[in-house]
Amino acid sequence: MIKNLLRLAVLVMLLTAGWAIYFVATPLQLPSTPYGFTLKHGSSLRSVARQLVDANVLKEPWGFTVLVRVMGKAGELKAGNYYLESNPTPLQLFRMVTRGDVSQSEITLIEGWNFKRMRQALNEHPAIRHDSEHMSEQEILEKIGARETLAEGLFFPDTYYFSSGMSDLDILRRAYQTMQKRLEAAWAERDPLLPYHTPYEVLIMASIVEKETGQAFERPIIAGVFVNRLRINMRLQTDPTVIYGMGDNFDGNLRRTDLLTDTPYNTYTRFGLPPAPIAMPGWGALQAAVHPATTKALYFVGKGNGTHKFSNSLEEHNLAVARYQLGRKRGAQN
């Protein structure tokens, strides 16, 4: 009787071993190749196996579940986007999802975006987990460990790569920490005679420069004009700050009455820098803020081609306005 039981046990072991060898070495039949699938963050082994079945990678979940448990890797399954170039064996699939050989997603935060526009981009991205979607600005800052009370301008514009299902809070935290490092580097390079008292003031100036011009060569000159104005206690009188202060009331046209309507951000009615940044400045704008051009210019006006005419005096500036703005309006009416 005992011998028969031993023979049966050996037979079961051999059959199990044979099945295991066959299972791990037999290529899976994918619907097509290349083929992609996604594993969600926070998934258990059972959930991962079910997701693989639902994605038509596996025909049934239990074989893969047994393989993972036998290998002792149940707690090491990685979430993300996966792409298979050919039909893998279950063993190859196991190695892929425990190593985390994911295909990364990306999101690009653009220079000059404000915080509202950045949140919109995060909320619209299909590969991001939208944990912050219903949070207030202050809640988000607390979650990412920010010390500031206003979120505007605190996030560095760049392309950020992430695995599918990552929280938007993680991306915001990375963008915030990157801006802190870049701002710290810019602050360390500054001329101490510049009229800034804190790195945050550099950030504010850089955000204004970012919104004033898209031309890299003009950024230091724009910064130089504003630094000159700060030094002589002259109002900055920059349209982007007025527009920012108007919020949703701005309809695309900036009128004289808007320039005269006081808000904390109206640099036509108030002296000095506005209380906070008005957009996300890039590295070029940060560099311009701490390395402004040496210039006597106090004024500039758009020439209609994306560049500006800089003037040292109000008389010269008025002539430039008549030439480039009033002349352009007359041409449009003819």
Image (spheres, grey):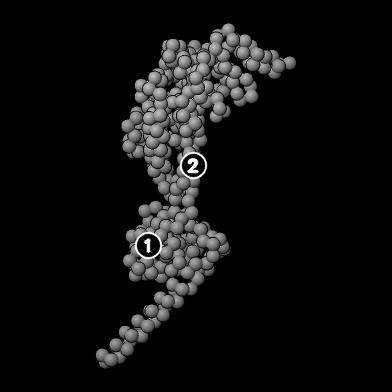
Q: In the rendering, which numbered label is found on residue 159?
A: 2
Q: Nearer the viewer, residue 280 or 121?
A: 280
Residue 109 spot, x, y in % from top left: 49, 37
Above/below status of 294 relative to 23: above
| Residue visible at 42% across and 64% down in the picture | 95
Do the residues under discs 1 and 2 have CB atoms within 8 angstroms?
no
| Residue visible at 37% across and 32% down in the picture | 184
Residue 177 spot, x, y in % from top left: 38, 38
Disc 1 secondary structure class: helix
Above/below status of 85 relative to 268: below
Residue 17 spot, x, y in % from top left: 38, 79
Screen quadrant of the N terminus? bottom left
Screen quadrant of the C terminus? top right
Q: Dot 2: few (<14), some (14–19), or many (≥20) neighbours within 10 Å?
A: few
Three-letter amino acid code at the position of disc 1: Arg
Q: In the rendering, which numbered label is found on residue 46?
A: 1
Taking the image as shown, residue 180 lies to the left or right of residue 318, namely left
Q: Which residue is situated farthest in the right direction here?
A: 334
| Residue visible at 43% across and 11% down in the picture | 233
| Residue visible at 45% across and 66% down in the picture | 92
Disc 2 secondary structure class: strand
Q: Nearer the viewer, residue 12 or 178?
A: 178
Q: Nearer the viewer, residue 88 or 231?
A: 231
Residue 156, quarter of picture: top left
**Does residue 138 appear in this view?**
yes
Q: Nearer the viewer, residue 289 or 264?
A: 289
- C-alpha distance separating marks 1 and 2: 34 Å
Above/below status of 305 relative to 124: above
Q: Dot 1: few (<14), some (14–19), or many (≥20) neighbours within 10 Å?
A: few
Q: Earlier in the sequence, mark 1 or mark 2?
A: 1
Residue 222 spot, x, y in % from top left: 52, 21
